[in-house]
Image (tube, rainbow, N blue to C red):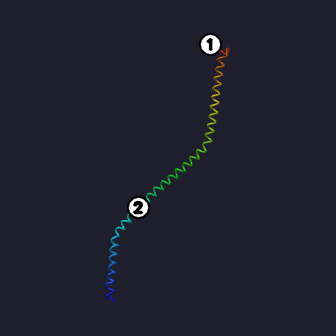
Amino acid sequence: MSQLLVPLLNGLLSRRQTKHESAVDQVPLLVQSLGAVAQDVRDIKAELRVVNEHAAMLKVVELRLGALEDWMGAARPQLHQVVNHVTLLMGERTSRQLQHAADVVAKDSDPGHPESIPAS
């Protein structure tokens, strides 16, 4: 029986040895693949950092835009009030100018007024 088992065991050991040698031959390929995967992971992390930086910058811009919109909303009624005052003042100025022109014309057309007598 031992004569039967010895060749069988030798065959099993030989096949096992072959499998181990084959696995040992694949180790460098596996190490190379793991290195490539690790580099890909580092690249992805770097890209994610850039994306996070851009997201933070976008958040700041959105906050500034919101503050600007709030400021514009608060300034708009004040601006309308200033425009109304300026329009009123310009109207008053124009009215005074017209009144002054009318007074000048009235003086020139008044025959008893000394300025309306032509110099000879």
Q: Residue furthest top?
A: 120
The relative height of residue 12 versus residue 31 in the rendered view (above or below) is below
Quarter of the image that includes the C terminus = top right
Q: Nearer the viewer, mark 1 or mark 2?
A: 2
Checking the image for residue 40, the label placed there is 2
Q: Which residue is mark 1?
A: 118
The relative height of residue 105 versus residue 10 in the rendered view (above or below) is above
Nearest the camera: 68 or 24?
A: 24
Amino acid type, residue under disc 1 in the picture? Pro
The relative height of residue 69 versus residue 20 in the rendered view (above or below) is above
Q: Position of residue 47 (x, y in %)?
A: 44, 57
Nearest the camera: 57 or 48?
A: 48
**What residue sits 31% from the left and 84% below the top?**
7
Alpha-carbon neighbours of circle 2 within 10 Å: few (<14), some, or many (≥20)? few
In-image side of 81 versus 33 (left or right):
right
Checking the image for residue 67, the label placed there is none
**What residue sits 37% from the left and 65% below the top?**
33
Nearest the camera: 69 or 26?
A: 26
Quarter of the image that includes the N terminus = bottom left
Q: Position of residue 68 (x, y in %)?
A: 56, 46
Amino acid type, residue under disc 2 in the picture? Asp
The relative height of residue 14 versus residue 115 in the rendered view (above or below) is below
In-image side of 101 versus 58 (left or right):
right
Calculate the distance from the C-alpha at mark 1 to the C-alpha at mark 2: 102 Å
Q: Position of residue 76 (x, y in %)?
A: 61, 42
**What residue sits 33% from the left and 73% below the top?**
22
* Numbered disc 2: secondary structure: helix
**What residue sits 33% from the left and 78% below the top?**
15
